[in-house]
Image: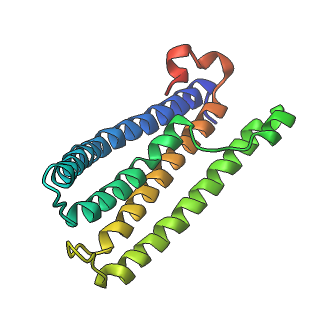
C-alpha cells in the first residue's frame, strides 16, 4: 500500500505530463495553421486585386481558399475544447453542483466518442472522395476530408488529455492544489 504522499506526487506528475503534451500539440499545430492563414490572406488578397483592378479573377483562388478555410477551422477545433469555449448545456451542473465532476467526465467521454466517430467517418470519406477533383485546380477532395479527420482526431486527443487531468486533479487532496498548479 502506497503512502498518500506518493499518490499525490503521481497525480501531480500525471497532470503535468498531460499539460506538456497539450503544449506540444499547441506548438505542432500553430506552425501549419500560421502558414495556412498567411497563405489564405495572400491568396484572397491576390483574388481581390485581380477581380477589382484587372477585372480578371482567377477561378482557382476560390477553391484553394475554401480548402484552406476548412483545414484551418478543423485543425483549430481542439483549441475550443482546450479553452472551454465549446457550446455546453449546464442545466444539470447548475441544478446538482455536487455532481459536477460526474457530469464533466460524462461530457468528456461523450465528446471523445463523437470526435472519434467523426474522425473515422472522415478517414473513410477522404478515401471515398479521393477520386473527385476540384474543377479549376484539380485538388483532390481527399485533402478536404483529411483535414476534418486530423482536426477531430486532435480534438479527441485534447479532450482525452483534459479528462486525464481532471481525474488526476480529483485524486489530489485540496491542499495540494496551489494557484500555479491549478492552471495545469
For this view, does 149 lie left or right of residue 139?
right
The image position of residue 118, as x and y in percent, is 52, 66
Instruction: Classify 123 as above or below 51.
Output: below
In depth, the one of 11 and 7 nearer the eye is: 11
For this view, does 99 lie left or right of residue 149?
right
Residue drawn at (16%, 61%), measured in percent from left and top?
A: 56
User: How many numbered markers are drawn?
Assistant: 0
The image position of residue 85, as x and y in percent, is 56, 38
For this view, does 121 lie left or right of residue 98?
left
Instruction: Classify 2 as above or below 78.
Output: above
Residue drawn at (41%, 73%), measured in percent from left and top?
A: 123
Instruction: Classify 19 as above or below 180.
Output: below
The image position of residue 133, as x and y in percent, is 27, 79
For this view, does 64 lie left or right of residue 165?
left
Q: Quadrant of residue 165?
A: top right
Instruction: Classify 11 as above or below 129.
Output: above
The image position of residue 5, as x and y in percent, is 58, 23
Q: Quadrant of residue 117?
A: bottom right
Identity of the residue furthest to the left in this view: 54
Quarter placement of the N terminus: top right
Residue drawn at (20%, 52%), measured in percent from left and top?
A: 43
Identity of the residue furthest to the right in this view: 95
In depth, the one of 128 and 115 nearer the eye is: 128
Residue drawn at (82%, 42%), measured in percent from left and top?
A: 92
Amino acid at each position: 500500500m502506497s503512502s498518500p504522499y506518493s499518490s499525490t506526487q503521481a497525480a501531480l506528475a500525471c497532470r503535468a505530463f498531460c499539460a506538456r503534451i497539450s503544449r506540444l500539440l499547441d506548438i505542432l499545430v500553430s506552425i501549419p495553421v500560421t502558414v495556412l492563414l498567411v497563405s489564405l490572406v495572400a491568396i484572397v488578397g491576390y483574388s481581390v486585386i485581380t477581380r477589382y483592378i484587372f477585372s480578371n479573377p482567377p477561378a482557382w483562388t476560390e477553391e484553394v481558399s475554401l480548402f484552406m478555410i476548412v483545414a484551418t477551422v478543423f485543425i483549430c477545433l481542439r483549441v475550443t475544447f482546450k479553452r472551454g469555449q465549446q457550446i455546453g448545456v449546464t442545466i444539470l451542473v447548475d441544478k446538482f453542483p455536487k455532481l459536477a465532476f460526474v457530469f464533466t467526465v460524462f461530457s468528456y467521454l461523450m465528446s471523445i466518442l463523437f470526435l472519434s466517430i467523426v474522425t473515422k467517418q472522415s478517414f473513410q470519406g477522404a478515401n471515398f472522395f479521393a477520386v473527385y477533383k476540384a474543377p479549376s485546380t484539380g485538388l483532390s477532395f481527399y485533402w478536404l476530408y483529411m483535414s476534418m479527420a486530423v482536426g477531430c482526431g486532435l480534438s479527441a486527443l485534447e479532450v482525452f488529455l483534459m479528462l486525464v487531468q481532471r481525474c488526476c486533479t480529483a485524486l489530489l487532496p485540496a491542499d495540494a492544489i496551489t494557484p500555479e498548479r491549478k492552471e495545469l
